[in-house]
Image (cartoon, helix red, strand yellow):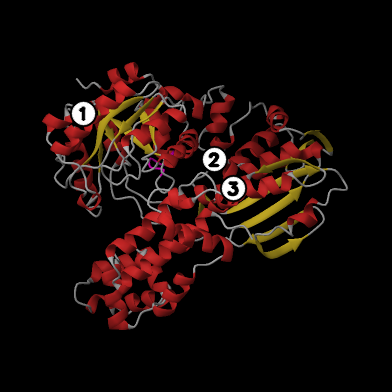
């Protein structure tokens, strides 16, 4: 059975959680966390790399021991060390650690004092006010626990797009290679490129004698066959993802694709237009009475209701139907429009590759410039840069720019925004940089007004350019901090600052609605990868997906410009 990177990374992450609860060596715990991040960010499945004879020990931060463990998971489906550790420490304690505010020490304290070994028992203890009785805990912590456990119920039903992507691609490749298959499209929220996916809807056209449905239910990764019909089947994959397969006649394939791609609200809005024209739209076509008048392509379906083609990413009923009627749909940004990357890390802080390696990878990926924005000194855990180290890095960047051709390295920093709104480095050194990204990495729990004013005070610095990952959320893991995003955007406009769309798949921050809000205000956005490894530069495509969902055009995005033009935009009055 194929093993995807998501499954390998999950085992390393669980092992790190349990070892941390046990009080294992910090460096050992960190090594497993780092390995999980490295594997999850690989552009290809580790299994495929092993099959091609690649040496995984050459990956950053992996080495021979971890490479062997990756191979063990790929071959056996599980890691023996994880199983052994779970026997020593209840596995669900690791799940408890994933709740914001509950680190290993707190989880161990709850476990030792109350015998709590599961989220269910933790909820019960919090509801009975047992947690607040423990030293170092209180009413707020108890309320947070209940709130986060409830929130996880919703998140557990949806999977991050980046984790679904390799699963969907593998399945599509498998089905496309079957005898008699003509078209295979993964529809639904996956085609709309939503940041999380509930299930997969796959639509197929094929010859009448194709064995596609029978072969589909024999797919290696299937854990359960829920339904097996002649033209439709439903399965649950080993990953827990549900997949619905539908075989459609070519005469109505476009109608089905349109029907199974759009959100419910979008489809209702289009059906209402059809009803006004005395037409009916469903997955089998567009009908006038009993006669099907369209259905083979999405374009002809929309033409019958007087609309142009609406890109899948926009089909959420957030004004796209009205814009289509008015001929005012945006010309959405494409990956090829982006010229540079404005947020990347190296080994000088918590990145995995050297300055030169990151530069060469950016050049190879077709970028014209790359901003190196290592962390500032406040992030001590990742060896953030002080002014002295930053100036030395700037000298090395100047030397590298003289050495390399076809790529320009920009001198930057991801400077911490401190609690009072001051920046972690003095303005004199920040003023020497090409680019300053300001970000929050601490004090996420400030009240909304205070958090908002904190960011606005940071923007008052004349050297501040871009607000990094503006809401601080981690998809399915951490809620955004309380902040008035509209007020922040207005402040950015007033000061000549910009917002980042952080393309790291765990973040995708700004979200799609905020991107649309920025566009409506005329506030430009930087789509950046926050790359910590050369392979992370490929995250740009997830940022483009999010930008398209947020209606952004190429002109709305800072880094679609040549460096000379971008430099002018970064110059504050």
Q: Please give the name of the residue rendered at 42% of the width and 61% of the height, measured from the top-left corner.
A: 65
Q: Tag 1 or tag 3, which sits nearer the N-term?
A: 3
Residue carrying label 2 = 316
Q: Position of residue 563 (x, y in %)?
A: 34, 20
Q: Secondary structure at mark 1?
A: helix
Crowding around mark 3 (Cα neighbors within 10 Å: few <14, some 14 to 19, many 20+) is: few
Q: Secondary structure at mark 3?
A: loop
**How far apart are the alpha carbons under marks 1 and 2?**
48 Å
Q: Tag 2 or tag 3, which sits nearer the N-term?
A: 3
Residue carrying label 3 = 52
Please say if 546 is above or below 147. Answer: above
| Residue 506, visible in the rendered structure | yes
Q: Tag 2 or tag 1, which sits nearer the N-term?
A: 2
**To which quarter of the image does residue 324 belong?**
top right
Crowding around mark 1 (Cα neighbors within 10 Å: few <14, some 14 to 19, many 20+) is: few
| For discs 1 and 2, the disc positioned in front in the rendered view | 1
**To which quarter of the image does residue 485 belong?**
top left
Please say if 565 is above or below 417. Answer: above
| Residue 497, visible in the rendered structure | no
Residue carrying label 1 = 395
| Start-end of magenta stretch | 508-512
Q: Secondary structure at mark 2?
A: loop
Total numbered circles: 3
Quarter that holds the N terminus: bottom right
For the stretch drawn in magenta, what is the main secondary structure? loop
Crowding around mark 2 (Cα neighbors within 10 Å: few <14, some 14 to 19, many 20+) is: many
């Amino acid at each position: 059975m194929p093993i995807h990177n998501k499954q390998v990374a999950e085992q390393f992450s669980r092992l790190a959680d349990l070892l941390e609860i046990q009080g294992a060596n910090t460096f050992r715990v960190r090594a497993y966390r780092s390995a999980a991040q490295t594997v999850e960010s690989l552009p290809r499945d580790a299994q495929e790399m092993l099959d091609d004879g690649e040496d995984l020990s050459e990956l950053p931060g992996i080495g021979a021991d971890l490479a062997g463990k990756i191979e063990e998971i790929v071959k056996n489906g599980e890691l023996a060390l994880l199983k052994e550790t779970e026997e020593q420490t209840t596995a669900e304690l690791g799940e408890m650690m994933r709740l914001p505010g509950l680190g290993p020490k707190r989880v161990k304290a709850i476990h030792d004092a109350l015998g709590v070994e599961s989220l269910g028992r933790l909820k019960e203890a919090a509801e009975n006010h047992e947690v607040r009785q423990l030293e170092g805990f209180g009413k707020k912590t108890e309320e947070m626990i209940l709130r986060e456990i409830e929130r996880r119920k919703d998140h557990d039903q949806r999977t991050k797009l980046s984790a679904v992507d390799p699963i969907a691609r593998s399945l599509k490749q498998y089905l496309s290679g079957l005898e008699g298959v003509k078209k295979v499209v993964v529809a639904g929220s996956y085609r709309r490129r939503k940041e999380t996916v509930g299930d997969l809807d796959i639509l197929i056209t094929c010859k009448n004698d194709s064995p596609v449905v029978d072969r589909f239910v024999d797919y290696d990764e299937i854990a359960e066959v829920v339904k097996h019909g002649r033209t439709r089947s439903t399965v649950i994959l080993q990953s827990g993802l549900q997949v619905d397969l539908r075989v459609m006649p070519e005469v109505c394939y476009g109608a089905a694709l349109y029907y199974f791609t759009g959100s419910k609200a979008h489809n209702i809005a289009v059906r209402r237009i059809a009803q006004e024209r005395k037409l009916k739209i469903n997955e089998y076509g567009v009908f006038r009475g009993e006669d099907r008048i369209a259905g083979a392509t999405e374009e002809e379906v929309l033409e019958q209701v007087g609309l142009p083609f609406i890109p899948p990413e926009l089909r959420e009923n957030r004004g796209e139907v009205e814009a289509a009627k008015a001929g005012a749909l945006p010309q959405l940004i494409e990956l090829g429009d982006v010229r540079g990357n404005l947020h990347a890390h190296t080994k000088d802080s918590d990145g995995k590759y050297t300055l030169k390696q990151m530069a060469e990878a950016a050049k190879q990926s077709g970028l014209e410039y790359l901003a190196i924005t290592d962390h500032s000194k406040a992030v001590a855990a990742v060896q953030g840069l002080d002014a002295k180290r930053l100036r030395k890095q700037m000298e090395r960047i100047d030397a590298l720019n003289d050495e390399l051709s076809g790529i320009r390295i920009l001198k930057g920093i991801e400077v911490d925004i401190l609690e009072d709104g001051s920046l972690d480095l003095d303005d004199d050194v920040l003023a020497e940089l090409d680019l300053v990204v300001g970000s929050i990495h601490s004090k996420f729990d400030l009240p909304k007004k205070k958090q908002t004013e904190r960011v606005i005070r940071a923007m008052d610095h004349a050297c501040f350019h871009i607000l990094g990952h503006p809401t601080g959320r981690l998809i399915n893991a951490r809620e955004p901090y309380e902040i008035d995003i509209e007020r922040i955007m207005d402040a950015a406009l007033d000061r000549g600052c910009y917002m980042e769309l952080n393309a790291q798949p765990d973040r995708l921050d700004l979200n799609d609605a905020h991107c649309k809000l920025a566009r409506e205000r005329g506030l430009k956005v930087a789509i950046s990868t926050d790359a910590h490894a050369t392979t992370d530069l490929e995250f740009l495509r997830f940022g483009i997906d999010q930008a398209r969902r947020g209606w952004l055009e190429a002109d709305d995005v800072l880094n679609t410009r040549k460096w000379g033009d971008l430099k002018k935009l970064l110059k504050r009055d």
